[in-house]
Image (cartoon, rainbow, N blue to C red):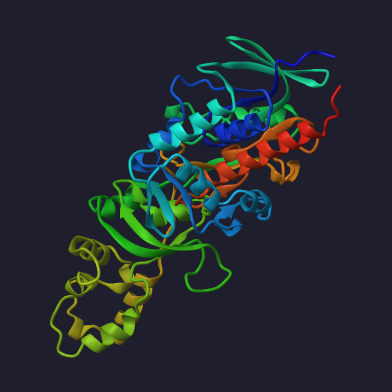
Amino acid sequence: MSCADFDVAIIGAGAAGMMAASVAGQGGLKVVLLDHASRLAEKIRISGGGRCNFTNTGTTPANFISRNPHFSRSALAGYTPDDFLKLLRRYRVAWHEKHKGQLFCDDSSESIIQVLRCECDQARVSWRMPCEVKEIGRDADLFVVRTNSGVVRTANLVMATGGMAIPQLGATDFSLKVARQFGLKVVEPRPALVPLLFDAMQWKPFSDLSGVALKVKVGTGTLGRKGTGAEFFEDLLFTHRGLSGPAILQISSYWEPGQPIEIDLAPGQQLEPALLELRPGNRQQLSTVLAGLWPRRLAEQWLAHTPVSMGDAASVRLADASNKLLHDLAQRVHHWTLAPSGTAGYKKAEVMRGGVDTHDLNQKSMQAKAVSGLYFVGEAVDVTGWLGGYNFQWAWSSGVACGRALVAAHQAVPAR
């Protein structure tokens, strides 16, 4: 039998990787962390505008997308947002809630990186950075990791290299390649939490609205009709090439190519009866009326480019508008349907959707069912969170689940 250099080798020193390393190391295992980057945890550093939206107090399995929607339940229950907050309190990291349970550092995301680094150092984790992995193989019951700085032999290998989002920071599909190498299935990856783009000619009338923002409801089905798709009530932002903002980032994770999205530009309002009530004697043009709801240039541009069947609605005075025109106008405001041509891609995506098929993993340990000692955590797994701190919580929870499982397995082995 070959001799192992480490009990655990973890490839990827990001959120999930450091969490798994610290838990395993503090449980008595000899752990090494390998990462190809020269600077630690760049994705954590840039997240949340530099303040790191590190969790969400409302985290539940319903806030995640996966072909196996129940897979995340065990890990999330085993390590909650409150558990992570206890860790931050130990290090006196100050934080605040910004919006809908989203928690951010008061200072900078560097605070989170230092907490994780200290936890790993206390666990006597060995660091190899920068360290490029060239090849992974097997030698009897050990994994053999060949790198540009030598060979690492280990009984347990944890893949924590994340997904393909933000390749400019070094993101790759390495974990997915390793999964396929060892016979695991992969759910087709694609960009998520990403701006949506439109055909240039289709979007030309709205490209000048870049920078305009408003609160909307957006969905992949018919808004207001139960069971037709996902819906989010968030801010929308017009861009030169399409739409962005929290509402669009959220719905992008559910959007399928070729599928339209539907936007309610006046959520929570009953526009038709409101217009009918305002109509008697009202000489304002419809664009002026809608400017009471939206920025004026949006009202003018949107009305000027509504379908021909509505005629030149922008110049119509409210008092002269027919019942049919106001009905059609209200319907289009509440159900503006658009067909994106694509997304802004991994360079603009916050995360990757898809990944290692959860049906091939144990939900309590993150270990591959068919390959003893091989684990996958964090973004590499087919568990994708909503915008708002959920993906970091999945990194913490899956990393802890993996670390605890490694410790339990080690303790269960009889001493020789």
Kindly indicate the quadrant of the structure image that contains residue 314. bottom left
The quarter of the image holding the C terminus is: top right
Query: Above or below — where is 366 with respect to 247?
Result: above
Please identify the residue farthest to the bottom as the structure is shown. Answer: 280
Q: Is residue 362 left or right of residue 48?
A: right
Q: Can residue 347 be seen in this view?
A: no
Image point 83% across, 30% down: which residue? 413
Residue 67 drawn at (x, y percent) = 66, 51
How many discs mark residues in the rendered view? 0
Residue 161 drawn at (x, y percent) = 57, 30
Residue 167 drawn at (x, y percent) = 46, 30
Nearest the viewer among 291 and 361 is 361
Please identify the residue farthest to the left as the structure is shown. Answer: 283
Residue 320 drawn at (x, y percent) = 19, 84
Q: Is residue 122 left or right of residue 242?
A: right
Query: Above or below — where is 46 with respect to 358?
Result: above
Q: Is residue 131 visible?
A: yes
Query: Above or below — where is 117 with respect to 285?
Result: above
Kindly indicate the quadrant of the structure image that contains residue 284. bottom left
Nearest the viewer among 245 and 209 is 245
Q: In this view, does 76 lie to the left or right of 319?
A: right
Image point 20% across, 69% down: which residue? 291
Q: In this view, does 130 lie to the left or right of 202?
A: right
Query: Above or below — where is 9 with respect to 209?
Result: above
The quarter of the image holding the N terminus is: top right
Image point 51% across, 59% down: which residue? 58
Nearest the viewer among 9 and 248 is 9
